[in-house]
Image (cartoon, rainbow, N blue to C red):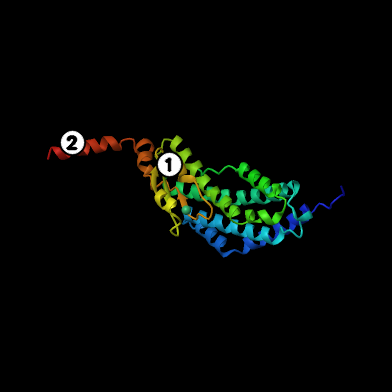
Amino acid sequence: MYEEEDIVPGLLELIESEFDERTYNSEKLKNALKLLKNKQANYKTANEFAIEIGEILSDVLNVHVTSEVLPGGKMHFNIADRVMNVTLKKNHELIASFAKDVQTELNHQAGLKLKGQKAPLNQDRIDGLVDKLSNADSFEDVKWLLDEPIINFSQSIIDSTVKENVEFHAKAGLKPKINRVARFECCEWCQRLQGIYDYKNAPDDVYKRHRRCRCNVEYDPQKGKVQDVWSKQWIDPMAETKKILRQSLNSKK
Ligand SMILES: [Zn+2]
């Protein structure tokens, strides 16, 4: 055994400064933030935001994490663990916060005074990536894990935000509907899965995302007409009575 220099602090500094610069200058991210500010952002915006963040992180990792810089051309556990946890937690924080703000805005537009719920961090997925990266004898065999799986991880934060908010609204007595939209003629499986589902009847697969899937999972409280349920219960408790009165008046004509 010989002492090796710890490459992680220097590596992380390079990765983080380049990531910050690229995200700061991204037109796609600027546009998404502008839409949010103008109250025009929706889950399509959030999904695009996630893909862009994921692509930038994937690019930056690919530039700096290479066989040449890794001792023995292997991504040892103590390197993979720190690099992936730091970068993916930041990735999660950025995307989950944006998606939460989008949901808050959608809630307000639907007349709901509810804050958006934030997606929890999927630590299992990070751990899984760290294991796969560090179990391989050669980094070359597993470097693909820094491509599509990073983007997939990023998009799944949006899917998870939908799930959190749909469940939260269902508990609040609303009747949320999940909308799955197949994009770019993704694949047969996704084409079959697309559609609008009642929260209660939605298939488990509605939140699932295979490799390279760019489909959208969306939740807009307006689409579930929750405002009707809401207004009957909270804003206009007399609506039902008025309707019955109107009907009986009409029948007397
Ligand atoms: Zn798909």
Q: Position of residue 237 (x, y in %)?
A: 34, 35
Secondary-structure class at tag 1:
loop
The percent coordinates of residue 224 (x first, y second) are 38, 44
Q: Which residue is identified by label 2? A: 248
Relative image position of residue 9 (x, y in whole percent)? 77, 53
Residue 199: quadrant of the picture? top left
> In the rendered structure, which disc, 2 or 1, sits on the residue that comes first in sequence?
1
Q: Using the image, determine if residue 198 lies above or below residue 50.
A: above
Mark 1 closeness class: few <14, some 14–19, many ≥20 residues within 10 Å: few
Residue 59 seen from this side = yes
Circle 1 is placed at which residue position? 203
Tell me which residue sits at (78%, 56%) in the image. Answer: 10
Q: Which residue is rendered at x = 50% and y = 59% of the image? A: 35
Residue that appears at 61% across and 57% down? 147
Say left or right for 29 vs 177: right
State the CA–CA distance, disc 2 to disc 1: 41 Å
In the depicted structure, whether residue 129 falls above or below residue 23 = above
Q: Nearer the viewer, residue 180 or 211?
A: 211
